[in-house]
Amino acid sequence: MASAKRTARVSQTSLHRIFTVAEAPDSTLGLIEQEMSQNLAGFLNNHIVASKNALTDIEKDFVNPFIPEQPEFVSDHMHHLLDKLVAQSVHTASPSFIGHMTSALPSFILPLSKLMVGLNQNLVKVETSKAFTPLERQVLGMMHNLVYQEGEGFYQEWMHSAQHSLGAFCSGGTVANITALWVARNKLLKADVHFKGISRAGLFSALQYYGYQGLAVLVSERGHYSLKKSADILGIGQDSVIAIETDEHNKIDCQKLAQKCQELSAQNIKVLAIVGVAGTTETGNIDPLDKMAHIAKQYQCHFHVDAAWGGATLLSYKYRGLLAGIEKADSVTIDAHKQMYVPMGAGVVLFKDPSSVADIEHHAEYILRKGSKDLGSHTLEGSRPGMAMLVYASLHIISRPGYELLINQAIEKAEYFAELINQHDDFELITEPELCLLTYRYVPKSVQRILANSDEESQYAINLLLGKLTKFIQKRQREAGRSFVSRTRIKVERYNDEKIIVFRVVLANPLTSKENLQDILAEQCVLAQESENFLPQLLSKT
């Protein structure tokens, strides 16, 4: 008798259970898995002697260049890994680890990862991934529909077409961005009856044939460094990635973007692509994508949106509108290993036009034959694991409403933390959260008064000391091991666009509580008092 399908209810409680409940351990490895899922705060400190050694000390455990001549028992090697590797690893799942875009993983990911590794499918060709290939194509269709919402008929026609692809799975946002610009470059400098195309003739011949003095990629000054990598690899040069100034909200200035397009056009330099950022790495802000799409159309260039971080926000009906205009992009990057809570590394690049990938199509006699549905014919990477399975499972187990709860909770948690900072006398909020990122710094109340009434030269001197204090606090907090925030250096309009060092936090971990955030600020206050150099100098100015 077939069992009836159960319907799970999405709630805060059920999501919390997904992120904390693991099956009973049946081995040493099982015990570690359970601790990683259930005892996030104490996993390293309580059950494995966590070392606070410097990186140079840890490196001493990994200096032997010789491959062993004698085998080890698995149990013995496991203990070796526990002592040397696990005990020294960064505990990214901890609720107090809020410095980077990594988070606790749902507990179902561990057993599913074992299944994925055990099956050992290679997604480059159907011959080694007969079931995984159509599954990956479906996941690409689900993600494409999340962005473009083309309708069921569109996906029935294109999802499993051998000559087309809705996108490609990648190891992360960097490869996704490279792939998007690779498609844009090859499409711009494509073959015709008189020219072999850039993929065969090369960049120099292509520019000569089409009569361009060069190519350019335009992105805000908050754009990800992977775009310069892309330009380097594609042969157009890192200097061709032109940073456009941002406004006081860290969004690209569209007037200056249009002006730069006009300047380049007058110099016969073709704008290859305009890149909108949907969730900047440092501040989490979203560019005005709708306006950028209009400018890209005006100058007939590829419009790419790097939504590696913010793309998952589309899963939230409440906040989806923040990414208005993304559906006009020719290509979009989204990282599933960020706000979709799957392990490193799983990114996707999506193409509005399924025929776009024809311009990067590759074939080989032994695999990737013409007419086959091999995914490798349209991807930069060759051999790839079946990470699509983990995204597929997460979309089903968590579901869109579950993801909406997670996204909404993260944004609202960032708003709470921003309010906490604003209410504290000795902290200064630098960037308001738009998604779940924000920046701030420790500034004693008396120093804040001085800053507000100082001339530009005095502000510079004070901000220099505050930067040193921020670095001191951040390093000491990391070394103490109870919590972690990152730091960065950004331009701040209120200080005459001076670049200052700030704390940067990412509040994506669903297990991070308000109490955790309160404790992090309290710890930073204590650490500030321990500074023997910077804080006394600052206070002396009052």
Image: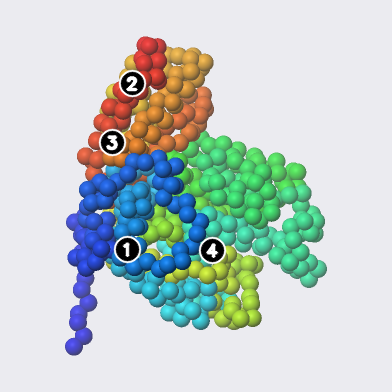
Mark 4, mark 2: which one is toward the viewer? 2
Q: Earlier in the sequence, mark 3 or mark 4?
A: 4
Q: CA distance from mark 3 to mark 4?
A: 41 Å
Within-10-Å neighbours for mark 1: few <14, some 14–19, many 20+: few
Q: Residue at x 42, y 62 (%)?
A: 146
CA–CA distance in space, label 1 to label 3 = 38 Å
Residue at 66%, 58% (x, y): give it.
185
According to the picture, the residue beneath numbered tag 1 turns out to be 76
Verify CB contact (< 8 Å) between mark 1 and mark 3.
no
Q: Is residue 149 visible?
A: no
In the depicted view, which residue is nearer to us: 418 or 130?
A: 130
Kind of residue at badge 1: Asp
As rendered, which of 117 and 508 lies closer to the eye? 117
Decide if residue 181 is on the left or right side of residue 1: right
Q: Earlier in the sequence, mark 1 or mark 3?
A: 1
Mark sitting earlier along the chain (4/2): 4
Q: Secondary structure at mark 2?
A: loop
From the viewer's perspective, tell me whether residue 184 is left or right of residue 432. Answer: right
Q: Amino acid at mark 3?
A: Ile
- Name which residue lies at 55% across and 42% down: 220
The kind of secondary structure element at disc 1 is helix
Q: Earlier in the sequence, mark 1 or mark 4?
A: 1
For this view, does 480 lie left or right of residue 198?
left
Q: Which mark is residue 444?
A: 2
- The local secondary structure at tag 4 comes to strand
The residue that label 4 is drawn on is 351
Mark 4: few/some/many CA within 10 Å (<14, 14-19, 20+): many
Labels 2 and 1: the sequence-earlier one = 1
| Viewer-side label of 1, 3 | 1
Q: Which residue is mark 3?
A: 520
Image position of 314 (left or right of 182) = left
